[in-house]
Image (tube, grey):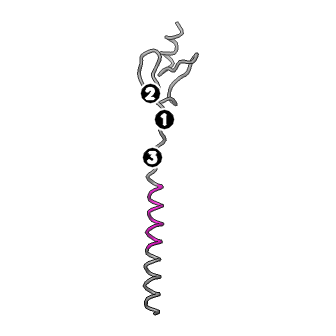
Amino acid sequence: MARLLLIISVVALVYLLIRSYRKSTSSLHDEPAVEDMVRCAHCGMHLPKGESIQFEGHLFCGAEHRDAYRK
């Protein structure tokens, strides 16, 4: 009986260790945040929204294209 309890304890311990290891490795491989792509109103190039410049409701890829749109 003691031998059976020892085997069950070892199996449970191994199971818990494997489950803990899987959780820690899965958190390391999280996917990067997805960002919307937008189109420059001047040249039509697509770029991430966070890198764009907004002016009068339009999005631009750079200050040069924003300035060219003003003229």
Q: Position of residue 10 (x, y in %)?
A: 44, 81
The residue carrying pointer 2 sits among few (fewer than 14), some (14 to 19) or many (20 or more) residues within 10 Å by Cα, namely: some
- Residue type highlighted by circle 1: Glu
Q: Residue furthest top?
A: 71
Q: Position of residue 23 (x, y in %)?
A: 47, 61
Magenta extent:
15-27
- Residue type highlighted by circle 3: Glu
Question: Under tag 3, what secondary structure?
Answer: loop
Give whichever of 2, 44 is nearer the camera. 2
Q: Residue furthest bottom?
A: 1
Residue underneath mark 3: 31
| Mark-to-mark CA distance, 1 and 2 | 10 Å
The residue carrying pointer 3 sits among few (fewer than 14), some (14 to 19) or many (20 or more) residues within 10 Å by Cα, namely: few
Q: Does residue 60 lie above or below 3 as drawn?
A: above
Q: Main secondary structure of the magenta part?
A: helix
Q: Does residue 6 lie above or below 49 as drawn?
A: below
Q: Is residue 23 magenta?
A: yes
| Mark-to-mark CA distance, 3 and 2 | 19 Å
Which residue sits at x=48%, y=35%? 35
Q: Position of residue 22 (x, y in %)?
A: 44, 63
Q: Residue 35: which disc?
A: 1
Q: Position of residue 59 (x, y in %)?
A: 51, 21
Question: Under tag 2, what secondary structure?
Answer: strand
- Residue type highlighted by circle 2: Leu
Frontmost of labels 1 and 2 is: 1
Which residue sits at x=58%, y=16%? 56
Residue underneath mark 2: 47
Q: Residue 52: which disc?
A: none
Total marks drawn? 3
The residue carrying pointer 1 sits among few (fewer than 14), some (14 to 19) or many (20 or more) residues within 10 Å by Cα, namely: few
Which residue sits at x=46%, y=50%? 30
Which residue sits at x=45%, y=82%? 8
